[in-house]
Image (tube, grey):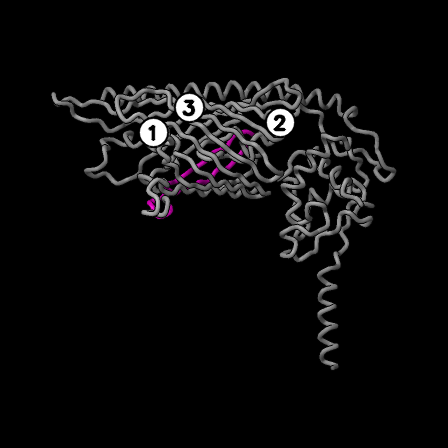
């Protein structure tokens, strides 16, 4: 019980720290916007170009001379199994359909994983205000659901005055399976786990973008085992760190090669998670984003991948997967 | 024979109806609005990128109106390389992209930054033949 309380306390501290950071930065940005708005009013006349054609004789639409941020560092919210630094524009509703087949290493037995048990996720996210996205996902794996927040804290500027974009991402995931002999739930808090990520990205050129995301997964409750003396021993640690690295290279206006490498950092008493390599193709249209890829991660909730991935790229345990995103603007 | 001629006439008339685009009046104030974004290399590159993402599927890569979705539309997308369109003011183009009509969606929410719509206008100018 003390252990549970300790982890609840630890989680509360994380959430509070995140909220304080978000609040401070939001206040800072609002103040900055206020002062730049005053500047832009003062400079408004200077930003209007002299009409180029005789027919264009009235003042131009106000294109305020504001700080210009780098656009489209990545094409969508997801890059295979990772979140990208991108937060959609205000008023965007996104519907995600994600699918992971089985590992290909069983060959024809299950047609390279296509007929193995698959993992699916449906997700909705919405951007109610600039730079903040809220979301909800549900997956068939352990009947898990999550609620998530994504906040674009800092943005790379076109003039390179600020060289990177920084986004915070966090979720709270709940295992909604019914309580029975196979589950370990004593109280409701045992069903919860959390995932936190600081995503730092840079768009190096129109074609190439790279991001690094230090990540933390926390599970309130995990399986253990009884040793010879009858004492409960841990298999996993409750907190696991990971570094996620993702890159995109555009091969045409609408399509890109995408890759990830995810390296677990924490050493667990047993069943250490394995790193992930994934690679694939992304195709973007005005209202859709499609990704098809191979990778080692078979789960669709990030904390499950951080702690439980046992697919080994050295032995060819890759799974085929795809992500489809549909976007609407309101 | 008479029936065949009548049928042919009806089909031709139907095609005429599909092909003809109805007038799209633009408020005078919008039509006369000057383009505040210089058509430099960066603006045209940004406009091209937006064109390929949002416009090319209907209007075609080179603006001929032959995009992959064009056949499914009720209105034939206009040939943007021709004088009929290129003769319009920048302000008119800005208004039409921003507001939309019928098959042509409004882009003021998808492209919320006014500068980006002007970038698209600057790119459309490069499609002229």
Majority SS type along the magenta span? strand
Query: What kind of element bears circle 1?
Result: strand
Nearest to the observer: residue A24 or residue B69? B69
Tell which subunit mark 1 falls on: A
> Based on the displayed image, in which of its 4 quarters is residue A53 positioned?
top right
Q: Residue at x 75, y 81 (%)?
A: B2
Tell which subunit mark 2 falls on: A
Question: Mark 3 or mark 2: which comes first in sequence?
Answer: 2
Left or right of A71? Residue A62 is right
Chain part drawn in magenta: A114-139
User: How far separated are the C-alphas under marks 3 and 2?
Assistant: 26 Å
Residue A69 painted magenta: no
Marks 1, 3: nearer the viewer:
3
Q: Residue at x 84, y 34 (%)?
A: A52
Q: Which residue is mark 3?
A: A215
Residue A129 painted magenta: yes
Location of residue A256 in the rendering, given as x and y in whole percent from the top left corner: 56, 36
Q: Which residue is mark 2?
A: A205
Query: What kind of element bears circle 3?
Result: strand
Question: Mark 1 or mark 2: which comes first in sequence?
Answer: 1
User: How far separated are the C-alphas under marks 1 and 3?
Assistant: 14 Å
Location of residue A306 in the rendering, given as x and y in whole percent from the top left corner: 37, 28
B88 over A172 or under it: above or below: below
Nearest to the observer: residue A155 or residue A125? A155
Question: Mark 1 or mark 3: which comes first in sequence?
Answer: 1
- Classify 10 Å Cα crowding around label 2: few (below 14), some (14-19), many (20 and above): few
Same-subunit check for callouts 3 and 2: yes
Q: Which residue is mark 1?
A: A193
Left or right of A119? Residue B78 is right
Location of residue A213 in the rendering, given as x and y in whole percent from the top left corner: 46, 24
Find residue A323 and name its label. none
């Amino acid at each position: 019980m003390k252990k549970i309380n300790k982890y609840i306390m630890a989680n509360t501290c994380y959430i509070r720290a995140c909220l304080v950071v978000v609040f401070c930065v939001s206040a800072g940005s609002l103040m900055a916007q206020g002062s730049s708005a005053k500047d832009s009013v003062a400079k408004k006349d200077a930003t209007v170009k002299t009409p180029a054609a005789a027919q264009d004789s009235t003042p131009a639409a106000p294109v305020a001379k504001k700080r210009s941020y780098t656009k489209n560092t990545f094409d969508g919210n997801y890059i295979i199994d990772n979140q990208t630094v991108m937060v959609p524009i205000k008023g965007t509703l996104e519907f995600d359909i994600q699918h992971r087949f089985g590992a290909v290493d069983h060959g024809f037995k299950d047609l390279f994983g296509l007929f193995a048990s698959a993992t699916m996720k449906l997700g909705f996210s919405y951007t109610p205000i600039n730079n903040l996205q809220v979301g909800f996902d549900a997956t068939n794996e352990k009947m898990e659901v999550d609620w998530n927040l994504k906040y674009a804290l800092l943005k790379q500027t076109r003039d390179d005055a600020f060289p990177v974009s920084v986004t915070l991402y966090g979720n709270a995931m709940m295992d909604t399976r019914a309580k029975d002999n196979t589950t370990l739930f004593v109280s409701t808090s045992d069903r919860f786990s959390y995932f936190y990520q600081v995503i730092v990205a840079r768009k190096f050129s129109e074609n190439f973008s790279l991001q690094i995301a230090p990540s933390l997964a926390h599970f309130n409750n995990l399986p253990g085992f009884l040793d010879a003396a009858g004492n409960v021993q841990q298999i996993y640690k409750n907190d696991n760190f990971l570094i996620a690295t993702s890159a995109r290279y555009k091969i045409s206006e609408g399509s890109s090669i995408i890759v990830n490498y995810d390296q677990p950092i924490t050493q667990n008493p047993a069943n250490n998670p394995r790193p992930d390599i994934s690679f694939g193709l992304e195709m973007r249209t005005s209202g859709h984003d499609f990704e098809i890829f191979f990778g080692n991660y078979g789960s669709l909730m990030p904390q499950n991948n951080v702690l439980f991935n046992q697919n080994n790229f050295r032995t060819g345990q890759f799974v085929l997967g795809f992500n489809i995103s549909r976007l609407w603007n309101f | 024979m008479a029936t065949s001629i009548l049928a042919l006439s009806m089909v031709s008339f139907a095609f005429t109806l599909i092909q003809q685009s109805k007038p799209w009046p633009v408020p005078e104030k919008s039509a006369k609005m000057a383009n505040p974004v210089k058509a430099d290399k960066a603006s045209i590159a940004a406009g091209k990128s937006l064109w390929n993402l949002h416009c090319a599927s209907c209007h075609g890569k080179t603006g001929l109106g032959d995009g992959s979705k064009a056949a499914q539309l009720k209105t034939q997308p206009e040939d943007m390389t021709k004088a009929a369109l290129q003769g319009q003011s920048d302000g008119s183009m800005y208004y039409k992209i921003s507001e939309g009509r019928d098959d042509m969606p409004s882009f003021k929410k998808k492209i919320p930054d006014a500068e980006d719509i002007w970038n698209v206008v600057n790119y459309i100018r490069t499609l002229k033949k």
